[in-house]
Image (cartoon, grey):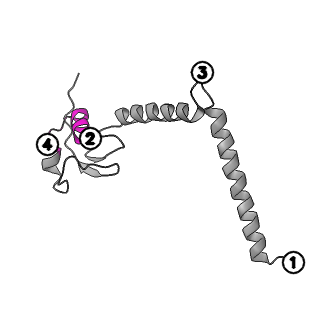
């Protein structure tokens, strides 16, 4: 006879297995082989990469800015119109050492069209 704690562990593992498998099946159906004869994983990677790039370009410039994946100080400067990002952020010692999640202060100077 199994103890109550062993029963709980077994049910938890079974639930985790079901969730993992259902997520794998769902992702395989959503991003399946595509029409360009690429493997499903390669197609999925390209879809995610295009979506992330689009999302980064559409992000608004705010006074406190969170650096996203693939962004550089130069790309943020061009996007938000602030050429003095390094001067406003003394915690940035090396402009080439910028990473996702870094908080920076910017002054927004977007051109009006």
Q: Tell me the crowding category of disc 3: few under 14, some 14 to 19, or many 20 or more residues within 10 angstroms, Cα based.
A: few
From mark 3 to mark 2, how far is it between C-alphas?
A: 34 Å
- The secondary structure type at the circle numbered 4 is loop
Instruction: Check disc 4 and report the residue beneath it.
Output: 84
Tag 4 and tag 2, C-beta contact below 8 Å: no
Residue drawn 19% across the image and 42% down it: 107
User: Which region is colored magenta?
Assistant: 73-85
Prevailing SS of the magenta stretch? helix
Q: Earlier in the sequence, mark 3 or mark 1?
A: 1
Q: Tell me the crowding category of disc 4: few under 14, some 14 to 19, or many 20 or more residues within 10 angstroms, Cα based.
A: few
Q: Earlier in the sequence, mark 4 or mark 2?
A: 2
- The secondary structure type at the circle numbered 2 is loop
- As rendered, which of 82 and 10 lies closer to the eye? 10
**Residue 37 to residue 17: above or below:** above
Residue 1's tag is 1
Q: Earlier in the sequence, mark 1 or mark 4?
A: 1
- The secondary structure type at the circle numbered 1 is loop
From mark 3 to mark 1, how far is it between C-alphas?
A: 53 Å
Instruction: Check disc 3 and report the residue beneath it.
Output: 35
């Amino acid at each position: 006879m199994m103890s109550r704690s062993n029963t709980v562990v077994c049910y938890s593992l079974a639930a985790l297995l079901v969730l993992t498998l259902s997520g794998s099946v769902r992702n395989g159906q959503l991003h399946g082989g595509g029409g360009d004869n690429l493997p499903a994983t390669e197609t999925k990677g390209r879809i995610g990469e295009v979506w992330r790039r689009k999302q980064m370009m559409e992000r608004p410039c705010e006074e406190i800015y969170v650096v996203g994946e693939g962004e550089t100080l130069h790309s943020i400067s061009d996007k938000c119109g602030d050429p003095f990002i390094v001067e406003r952020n003394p915690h940035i010692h090396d402009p080439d050492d910028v990473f996702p999640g870094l908080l920076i202060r910017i002054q927004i100077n977007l051109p009006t069209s």
